[in-house]
Image (spheres, rainbow, N blue to C red):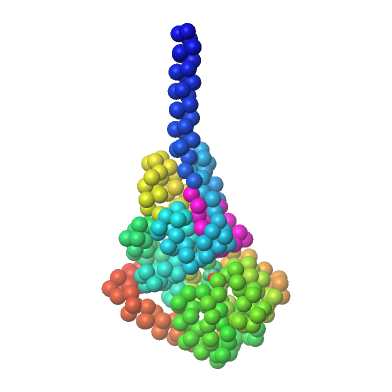
Amino acid sequence: MKTTIHAVLAASVMATALTTTASAQTRWDLATGYGDGVHHTINIKQFAEDISNATNGALSITVHSGASLFPQGEIHRAVRTGQAQAGELFMANMGNSNPVFEIDNIPFLASDWDSARALWEVSRPAVEAHLASEGIRFLFAVPWPAQGIYSQTPINTIEDISGLRMRAYSPMTTELSMLLNASPTTVQTPEIPTAFSTGMINSMVTSPSTGVSSQAWDFVNHYTDVQAWIPKNMVFVNERAFNRLSADVQAAVLEAAAAAETRGWEMAIAEAETATQRLADEGMQISTPTAELRSALEAIGQEMGGTWAAKAGAEGISILEAYYSR
Ligand code: PCA
């Protein structure tokens, strides 16, 4: 009889232990608007896998790519309200919350990798603080390769852009397009092929990565590699969801985030070359901008920088000062 009671007790203790282990397993959904082929999504999937391995599965993150859980325009709200625990967003898409998120969309402010890193270093604390004020914890940011112009005809001067129906992906690209006397239409990456094939757009400014993922060669023949700016995507998590994790799991998330940021920058740098080569292999004409085009675009960049600084106020000015005095 005694043994039986012991056996029953042991069994119930074990059952409790198992339940505890099972309930310690947390599942997060991570929403992104970008497809599986781009380096951002590949990197995020690796991030999720690193966390699962480091925590023995205590935190498992499902990556919902290609806007399959939320469209790009809803990811910020979804993470803020906890409908999705985590998300990835093009940083400048949060320009309505604060202009600081748009700093990496100013043409020619930081258009090589070293400058982009320096700009990120000085703007990161403000980005983190603004997200924190909304109950969102920043995890990591990864760039796109520098942005160039896709068009059906060669772009030698700024006048060649005038009148084009140009895709925009953010308020800053809309502003740029208007300053170029083109007509902007906002189109998210999954809709690029349809926007071209229906004639809604006949040109765009984006990276070689997005040119490849949208198979730009089906619609345009020219890529002018102006390297105008290096924008970033950021990955973030609802702060309450993060706080519910044990200290060990939190540490694993932060460690995987730091690794993802380092890896993501390396992937973007490699991608700038391989994706540009792919555009050429698919028959596109790749050209560097003429001096005339470059200086006209730089003048527009200056103007946009001034508009941005006026919007961003003291915080923006101090970030720019820190950037210029590096
Ligand atoms: N690709 C994204 C953002 C910047 C980029 O290179 C897009 O075109 O929407």
Asked if the magenta segment contains residue 36, the reply would be yes
Spot occupied by residue 48 in the image (x, y as percentages of width and height): 52, 49
Q: How many marks?
A: 0
Spot occupied by residue 44 in the image (x, y as percentages of width and height): 53, 55
Q: Which residue ends up furthest to the bottom in the rendered image?
A: 159
Front residue of 310/170: it is 170
Which residue occupies 65% across, 80% down? Answer: 198
Q: Which residue ends up furthest to the left in the rendered image?
A: 314
Q: Is residue 313 visible?
A: yes
Which residue occupies 58% across, 56% down? Answer: 42
Q: Is residue 115 visible?
A: no
Image check: 280 left or right of 72? Answer: right
Which residue occupies 49% across, 70% down? Answer: 230
Asked if the magenta segment contains residue 308, the reply would be no
Front residue of 234/184: it is 184
Part of the protein shown in magenta:
28-45
Front residue of 112/95: it is 95
The picture quadrant for ligand 1 comes to bottom right
Quadrant of the rendering where the C terminus is positioned? bottom left
Q: On screen, 82 above or below 175?
A: above
Q: On screen, 114 above or below 166?
A: above
Spot occupied by residue 250 in the image (x, y as percentages of width and height): 41, 45
Image quadrant assignment for residue 211: bottom right
Image check: 278 left or right of 300? Answer: right
Q: Which residue ends up furthest to the top in the rendered image?
A: 1
Spot occupied by residue 229 in the image (x, y as percentages of width and height): 48, 73
Which residue occupies 48% across, 60% down? Answer: 88
